[in-house]
Amino acid sequence: MTKLIFLSRLAAVIIVLFTSVTLFAAQSVTVTGSAVGSPDVAREQALANALREAIRAGVGVDILSESKVDNFTLEYDRVITSSFGYVKSYKIKSQEYDTKSQTYRINVEAEVDKGRPLMDNVLALKMLVDRMQSPRVVVETEENFSGMQAVQHSLSQVMFEELCQKIGLQVIKEHTVRKRSARESARAKLLGKNTISQAREAGISSVSDFTISGKINGSVGRIREPFPGVEVRDASLGVDLQAVWTDTGEIAATLAIPTSYFKGEAQMELPYDMPGQLLRHYLTVMLNGQRPEFKKNNALRFFDRIIAKWIVDLDLGRKVQLEFQRMDQSIFEKLLTTLRKTPGITYAWRREFDREFFSIIEIETRLPVEQIQAAVTEQLGRKYAVDTTTRRRMTFVPR
């Protein structure tokens, strides 16, 4: 049985067909989870604590009484897919962050069932993504292979993109989007709309939600003959993966698969005379966790972490950076106080203040962009205007 993260409030009743046969009826419970620390970390820990408490209340078992929530994704996996029970769906009832005590509290209504869902990891991820707004991802890979001739195309790029599509993520080809922008820029220029043309050429708009970067280092050995008449090649591969929020550059997930060594005689059917195909085969094994040593560290576990971050943003509200150019400190403090009292904003956090350059406030909210803008401009009046806006970042400049 593989681990499964069921995070979305939209995921209700989709797991019924996959549960074990049991006389235990699903329980609906309302619980509270809390955690102390900066809002970046505390909100995820509080959610994991709330869901762990939901299982304890619904099933009657304290599944992780001695464990400490210090890694959200790992803890969430263990909570959601405990052998004793799991969370089928949940809904955030309320949430707040106390800046004085630095405590994040979440009230959750959850439906808990006994046992553990039986489902393939890829299918589970796809079902989850299908029932929520799927994030857009751009995949970038960098390869360094020794012992073989350079290839004109990436061995790993297509593999990563196929995995993304397999679980339902929206894969964006950035160079194709840029080509489209170039055509639109040329059209705008012909129509005399030079400002729009320049904006298209600058590539200001956000292409994706996440940028996934992969670094793959590997080598293939010389052909050797371990047995009479049998020719093989050894190979080695290491993979480093990182996902960042494209808007802000904040790291969302990382995964390192240490360099692994593959002896040619272990799989003598592989094409020793095609080193590129050898590396592709072993990379597939590593990314899909097809050997015991890759069960915990593989690409699907990496996607687990990305989706966990994405759904936390959907359920608890996204973190939005508000950036202001040349702002007086008294105005900055008044705005910070106002945002903390604004309904729909869980917290407002001072990130950085620089009177001469840029000052940044970070908020957590489910409010649409228009309401965030209204909350800011209501306090600032006509002193500042919106310059640029993305889902997770807004910039304001003096009028």
Image: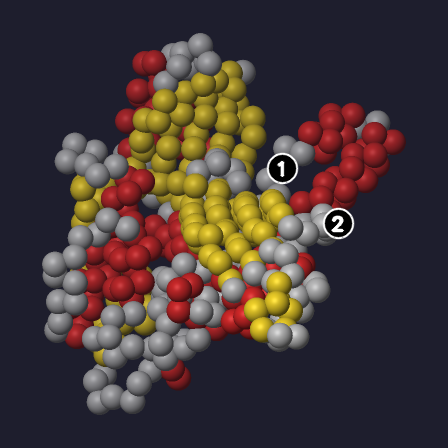
- In the displayed structure, would residue 71 be above or below residue 328? below
Residue type, label 2: Gln
**Residue position marked by numbered label 1 in the rendering:** 205
The residue drawn where x is 39% and y is 40% is: 319
The residue drawn where x is 15% and y is 36% is: 101
- The residue sitting at the right extreme is 190
* Left/right of residue 44 with respect to residue 359 in the rendered view: left
Q: Residues within 10 Å of mark 1 (few under 14, many from 20)?
A: few
Residue type, label 1: Ser
- The residue sitting at the front extreme is 228
Cα–Cα span, label 2 and label 1: 30 Å
* Left/right of residue 394 with respect to residue 275 in the rendered view: left
Q: Which one is earlier in the sequence, the residue at label 2 or at label 1?
A: 2
In which quarter of the view is residue 96 placed? top left
**Residue position marked by numbered label 2 in the rendering:** 152
Pick the front one: 313 or 375: 313
- In the displayed structure, would residue 301 be above or below residue 196? below
Residue 14: horizontal and vertical position, in percent? 41, 76
